[in-house]
Amino acid sequence: MRIDVLTIFPEFFTQVFDFGIIRRAKLADLVEINVHDIREFAADKHKMVDDRPFGGGDGMVMKPEPIFAAIENLLGTSNADEYPKGTSVVLLSPQGTTLRQSVAKELADDIDHLILICGRYEGVDERVNETLVSREISIGDYVLSGGEPAAVVLVDAIVRLLPDALGSDTSAENDSFSDGLLDCPHYTRPAEFRGMKVPEVLLNGNHAEIEKWRREKALEKTKLTRKDLLEGENGDM
Ligand code: ADE
């Protein structure tokens, strides 16, 4: 997979993709990640990337021209109908559909060229959304100062799902949400720490019993903290 991130703060990403699973995936050529400064595509001498909103109001709006130019530079077109197959242009914004495991999985499975536009200020000129954007994604019902942290979250959620990105195939299958439940608790050595003991069932080597215990604990935890998952309110996990 190739990922291109469009941002006015390229320095934000200096090291963030250089750790753990993402770093390993890059080294193994499972993913290539490029970060582009939107400002470099601004044609005017002041390299303006934002301007005041028509109709008045607070804040600044990101201008369309540099973003169109950046997309044309990457894809050779700013007509979404002409994007190559397997290409998706995602705008990170609080107005998008909420990121879920199923969305990350869909992108990991179906997309080989992902372009992320990090919105800033009060928003992005709507013509970007209308013309360039394949889908708008939010990472949750809260407002960040910009799409950059959201882009990092999305990249992480996708890259770990790419084939061979994790040490063993079963790791992603056992993640929270992969079966609609939260993950079960985990323990490692020592078997007793400051008087706190690891549940006996995990020590006895009976795999059927261990699986049963894990399923029960996952259900218990989901009931306690995310009842909505069981009631199908977020049923597209
Ligand atoms: N930009 C600002 N807030 C955001 C959010 N919740 N998700 C994605 N991008 C954002």
Image (spheres, helix red, strand yellow):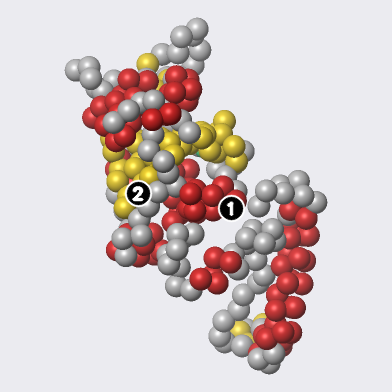
User: Relative to residue 65, is residue 165 drawn left or right?
Assistant: right
In the image, 222 versus 57, the foreground residue is 222
Where in the figure is residue 121, as x and y percent of width and height?
A: 44, 26
For image coordinates 72% across by 84% down, the residue present is: 208
Inspect the image, locate mark 2, and give the three-letter code of the amino acid beneath it. Answer: Arg
- For the view shown, which residue lies furthest in the bottom direction? 204
Residue 2, numbered label: 2
Mark 2 vs mark 1, CA separation in Å: 20 Å
Residue 151 at x, y percent in the picture? 44, 44
Mark 2 or mark 1, which is nearer to you? 2
Q: Where is residue 207, by image quadrant? A: bottom right
Query: Are the residues at dot 2 and dot 1 in contact (C-beta closer than 8 Å)?
Result: no
Q: Residue at x 60, y 78 (%)?
A: 187
Task: Identify the amino acid type marked 1.
Answer: Gln
Residue 186 lies, in percent from the top left, at: 62, 75
Left or right of residue 20, residue 218 in this image: right
Q: Could you say whether the residue bearing mark 1 is in a helix, strand or loop?
A: helix
110 lies above or below 37: below
Q: Residue, x 29% and y 20% (percent of image)?
A: 48
Mark 1 sits near ligand 1, with its Cβ under 8 Å away:
no
Residue at the image point whose x is 38% and y is 45% from the top: 113
* Callout 2: CB less than 8 Å from ligand 1: no
Q: Give 170 or 57, whichever is nearer the viewer.
A: 170
Residue matched to label 1: 101
**x and y percentages locating residue 100 in the rendered image:** 60, 48
* Quadrant in the rendering for residue 60: top left
Task: Tell me which corner region of the image, top left, top right, bottom left or bottom right, holds residue 206.
Answer: bottom right
Assess disc 1: are there few (<14), some (14-19) or many (≥20) residues with their C-alpha within 10 Å of its C-alpha: some
Counting residues from the start of the chain, the first of labels 2 and 1 encountered is 2
